[in-house]
Image (cartoon, rainbow, N blue to C red):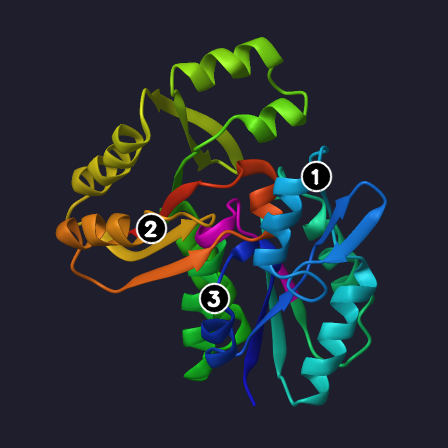
Amino acid sequence: MTVRIVTDSSCDLPQDLADQLLISIVPLKVRFGDDEFVDRETITTDEFWKKCAASPVLPETAAPSPGNFDAEFQKLAAEGATGIIVLNLSSDLSGTIQAAQVAARDFAGGIPVQVVDSRTATMGLGLIAIECAKRAQVGASLDDIVALANKLIPQMRVYGALDTLDNLKKGGRIGGAKAMLASALSIKPLIEITGGHVAEAGKQRTRSKALAHLISILKDNSGKIEQLGILHAQCADIDSFVAMVKEVYTGEVIVGDIGAVIGTHAGQGTIGIAFRLKA
C-alpha cells in the first residue's frame, strides 16, 4: 500500500475526484442555532444552502475532534497505509489543525502521521491535496510528499468574488445600514487568501465587473499557472464563468461546490478561483 492523504471538508473537492485519488476527507461540523450537522455526512451542500436561506441566524462551523481524525487514521492503517499526511486549512482560520495534531501525536497505529498547515483553504487546499495524492499513488515516500506539500503552499493563490454582504451582516461584521447601502450600490467585495489569512482584494460595483476582475487576475498570470480550480456557491452563472476562464486558460479546470465550511463565511453566490503558480 502507499502513503495516504487526509484533508478536511473545507477543501471543497468534488467527492468523486477525492475518491478516485484515495483522498480522505474529515468533516467539520456546522450549526444552525442548536442544530448541529456533520458536513458532507448529515447535511449535503444543497441542504446547507436551503437552511441558510431559511435561517434568521448565521450558521457557525466547528472543528472536528481529535477522535474524528484518529478514527480515519485507524481505518487507513487497517487498509495497509505505510504513512499518513494530513493537509488542513490554515491554522489562522480554524482550530481544525490542532485536532489533527493531537490525533497524530497520540496515534498508536504503528505508522507515521505528519500534519501540514496548508496556509490556505477551499480549492487552494484541495489542489495541494490532489498533487500530494498523485505523488502518493506512484509510490513516493512520506518525507518526499511532505516536502512537495511545503513547496506547493507558497505557490497557491485563492481569490473570491462575494455576491452578498448578508453573511457579514448577520455575523455582526458589518452594520445594517452599511450593508443596505452596499446592496443598493451593488458593491461586490473581492477577497483573497494570503499568508494564511483572508484579506480584502478590492471591490467592484457589479457582479459582472467582479467576475471580470477574476478573469483579469488569470490573464495577469498567463503562462505561469500549472493547476486551476473554480469554486462556486450555487451560482446560476457558473457555466458562463467557466467558459470565460477557458478562453484565457487552456489546461484542465476542476470545478467544485463551496460547501458548508467556506459557505458559512462567504455566502451564496460566491465564485472563486484557486491556482498554483509555476515554481
Q: Of label 3 and label 2, which has the lower sequence position? A: 3
Give me the residue at 80% from left, 71% from top. 107
In the image, is residue 74 part of the stretch drawn in magenta?
no
Q: Residue furthest front?
A: 54
Residue at position x 57%, y 28% in the image: 166
Rendering coords of residue 90 (x, y %): 58, 44
Residue 149 is tagged as none
Q: Residue type at mark 3: give it.
A: Pro
- Residue 14 numbered tag: 3
Q: Please tell me whether mark 2 sits on a helix, a strand or a loop.
A: helix
Would you call the spot at circle 3 few (<14 residues within 10 Å), some (14-19), or many (20 or more)?
Answer: some
* Residue 157 visible in this rendered orientation of the protein: no
123 within the magenta span: yes
Earlier in the chain: of badge 3 and badge 1, it is 3
Query: Between marks 2 and 1, how big is the CA–CA gap?
Result: 25 Å
Q: Quadrant of residue 203?
A: top left
Q: Secondary structure at mark 1?
A: loop
Query: What is the spatial separation of the Cα atoms under label 3 and label 2, in whole angstroms?
Result: 15 Å
Residue marked by disc 1: 55
> Dot 2 corresponds to which residue?
238
Q: Quadrant of residue 228?
A: bottom left
